[in-house]
Amino acid sequence: MTSVAWADWAGVASAILLAYTVFGLTGFGSAVVAVPILVHFVALKFAVPLVMLLDFGATLAVGALNWRLVRRAELARLVPCMLVGIIAGVTLLVSVEPRWLLLALGVFVLFNALWNLLRPVRPHPVSAWWSVPAGVGGGVFSALFGTGGPVYTTYLARRIEGPTFRATISSIILMSGVIR
């Protein structure tokens, strides 16, 4: 990484600071903020593992402090599906040309932004069966970009709320990092 200029390292540091400010406020979202910015300074294959390691530490701290609030039933539903998605995502990561992955990342970020801007503020609860596409989809995006959090968040926000939500989403992101 010695070929990265000091100005680029400043960009990397700024992206990480911004991303973990968001994480500190919400308990999730660091990867969806950091990765799209980081890929302007470093390769996607460097940005994703960097954010994964940082997420591991951050989610371990939040999860350890709030373990008693975690909805273990949601973990039991999401983790097996997440595993399937991570296997599919890793397969895509090593076999697809990076420019197509960057395009997919851009589309994902735009879709996620539009989804959150256009959906109702107080959506109705969803069935636990939605854990299957949420787990698989989140696993794919976790493996490809380290950004599975928005997918898990969309599902869990329609299942639980309050401090239990933050503790559960942090635990899911931690487990995603451990599995990856």
Image (tube, rainbow, N blue to C red):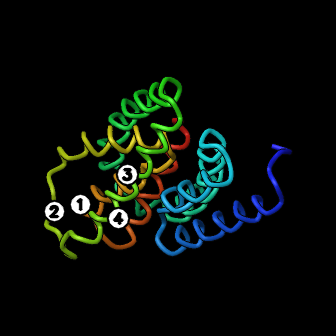
Residue designated by label 3: 108
Q: Are marks 2 and 1 in contact (CB under 8 Å)?
A: yes
Q: Residue furthest right?
A: 2
Residue at x 57%, y 66% (from the top left corner): 19
What is the crowding at mark 2: few (fewer than 14 residues within 10 Å), some, or many (at least 20)? few
Q: Nearer the viewer, residue 128 or 101?
A: 101
Numbered badge on residue 109: none
User: Height in image: 84 above or below 101?
Assistant: above
Q: Along the polypeptide, which appears first: circle 2 or circle 4?
A: 4
Q: Along the polypeptide, which appears first: circle 1 or circle 4?
A: 4
Q: Nearer the viewer, residue 136 or 107?
A: 107
Residue type, mark 2 in image: Pro
What is the crowding at mark 3: few (fewer than 14 residues within 10 Å), some, or many (at least 20)? some
Residue at x 59%, y 47% (from the top left corner): 52
Numbered badge on residue 113: 4
Residue type, mark 1 in image: Arg
Q: Nearer the viewer, residue 6 or 72?
A: 6
Residue designated by label 2: 125
Q: Along the polypeptide, which appears first: circle 1 or circle 3?
A: 3
Q: Tell me the distance, in whole angstroms, between the alpha carbons under discs 2 and 1.
A: 6 Å
7 horizontally vs 132: left or right: right
The secondary structure type at the circle numbered 1 is loop
Q: Nearer the viewer, mark 2 or mark 3?
A: 3
The secondary structure type at the circle numbered 4 is helix
Residue at x 41%, y 44% (from the top left corner): 104
Q: Are marks 1 and 4 in contact (CB under 8 Å)?
A: no
